[in-house]
């Protein structure tokens, strides 16, 4: 029998050492993430309405039920509207803010702090505060009435029947929740852009100024092309966040009125914890997982194409 030499043992030890360091984290992840995910995948093919009884295998029935579920398609549509409505704003507006606060002017540090403050505020606190602002006799309606813009308070979160819609597509209750998401996210994505702006050498702008590219035009000629990896990164991160939105909906509308502001994550929560449809909720979660997986793969592709040096 071949006996390992001291050099062989040293080589084995060197190869095993990184995995031994990773082992505690892998055990925790396995118990809290991977194993529950496998269980959820299994439960999506079962009926598990009575938690006192073992789940019963029903095959693809939950998926057929999902296909016929009008509320699911409505929540999926709302999530898509949320994605399309929020992401462009969170890609463009924070870049403008970052350019603004990147100026070397007195007091600019305070402006950075002011724009970033909503990020550190708890969503629970922010949601309650905005719910008060949106109330029928809240500050926002009183301001609009005082300026003579509206004659009576707008039902921002309660809505009417037929519903008020922005651009004839977005229910006003859903748009009101989207506004809170944008308000909370502006400062976070501004900081990402700010890091990118500060990595651009000043010499590039000076050379561009000599060629006649100055003022606002320099940002179109220089800033935007050099910030493309950051723009792509923010687009993917904000898209994933918009797909998973939950706290705003739970605190402000709870999916109402008539499911007009209900997103797919809130519908999953409702099925699991309100209706105790555990298996059906796992099926919805599997669909959500596939959507987020697609967005995550997109992010990896973007990172390989030019954003590998960006870390968030």
Image (cartoon, rainbow, N blue to C red):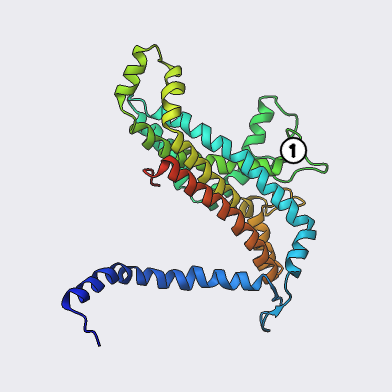
Residue 207 at least partly seen: yes
All told, the count of numbered labels is 1
Residue lying at the far left in this picture: please name it.
Answer: 6
Residue 251 position (above or below residue 198): below
The answer to whether 155 appears left or right of 125 in the picture is: right
Crowd rating for badge 1 (residues with CA inside 10 Å; few <14, some 14–19, many 20+): few
Residue lying at the far bottom in this picture: please name it.
Answer: 1
Residue located 63% across and 51% down the image: 249
* Residue 133 picture quarter: top right
Residue lying at the far right in this picture: please name it.
Answer: 162
Q: Position of residue 230 (x, y in %)?
A: 44, 38
Residue closest to the eye, 301 or 276: 301
Residue 134 at least partly seen: no
Residue 274 position (above or below residue 49): above
* Disc 1 element: loop
Residue located 38% across and 46% down the image: 311
Q: Position of residue 203 (x, y in %)?
A: 29, 22
Q: Which residue is mark 1?
A: 169
Residue 292 position (above or below residue 278): above
Residue closest to the eye, 213 or 15: 15
* On-image quarter of the N terminus: bottom left
Residue closest to the eye, 174 or 160: 174
Q: Position of residue 152 (x, y in %)?
A: 75, 33
Residue located 60% across and 70% down the image: 40
Residue closest to the eye, 312 or 104: 312
* Residue 9 picture quarter: bottom left
Q: Position of residue 84 (x, y in %)?
A: 63, 40
């Amino acid at each position: 029998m071949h006996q390992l030499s001291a050099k062989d043992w040293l080589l084995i030890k060197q190869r095993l050492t990184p995995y031994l360091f990773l082992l505690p984290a892998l055990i925790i992840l396995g118990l809290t993430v991977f194993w529950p995910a496998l269980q959820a995948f299994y439960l999506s093919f079962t009926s598990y309405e009575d938690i006192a009884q073992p789940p019963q295998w029903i095959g693809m029935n939950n998926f057929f039920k999902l296909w016929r579920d009008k509320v699911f398609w409505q929540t999926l549509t709302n999530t898509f509207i949320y994605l399309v409505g929020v992401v462009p704003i969170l890609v463009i507006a924070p870049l403008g803010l970052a350019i603004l606060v990147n100026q070397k002017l007195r007091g600019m540090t305070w402006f950075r702090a002011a724009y970033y403050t909503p990020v550190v505020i708890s969503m629970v606190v922010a949601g309650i505060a905005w719910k008060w602002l949106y109330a029928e006799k809240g500050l926002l309606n009183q301001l609009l009435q005082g300026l003579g813009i509206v004659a009576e308070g707008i039902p921002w979160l309660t809505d009417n029947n037929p519903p008020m819609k922005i651009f004839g597509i977005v229910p006003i209750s859903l748009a009101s929740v989207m506004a809170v998401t944008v308000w909370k996210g502006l400062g976070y994505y501004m900081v990402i852009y700010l890091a990118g702006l500060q990595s651009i050498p000043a010499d590039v702008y000076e050379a561009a100024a000599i060629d006649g590219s100055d003022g606002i035009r320099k940002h179109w000629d220089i800033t935007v092309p050099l910030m493309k990896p950051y723009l792509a990164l923010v687009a993917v991160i904000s898209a994933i966040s918009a797909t998973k939105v939950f706290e705003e909906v739970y605190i402000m509308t709870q999916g109402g009125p008539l499911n007009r502001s209900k997103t797919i994550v809130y519908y999953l929560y409702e099925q699991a914890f309100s209706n105790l449809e555990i298996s059906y909720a796992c099926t919805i979660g599997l669909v959500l997982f596939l959507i987020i997986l697609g967005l995550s793969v997109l992010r990896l592709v973007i990172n390989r194409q030019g954003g590998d040096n960006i870390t968030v």
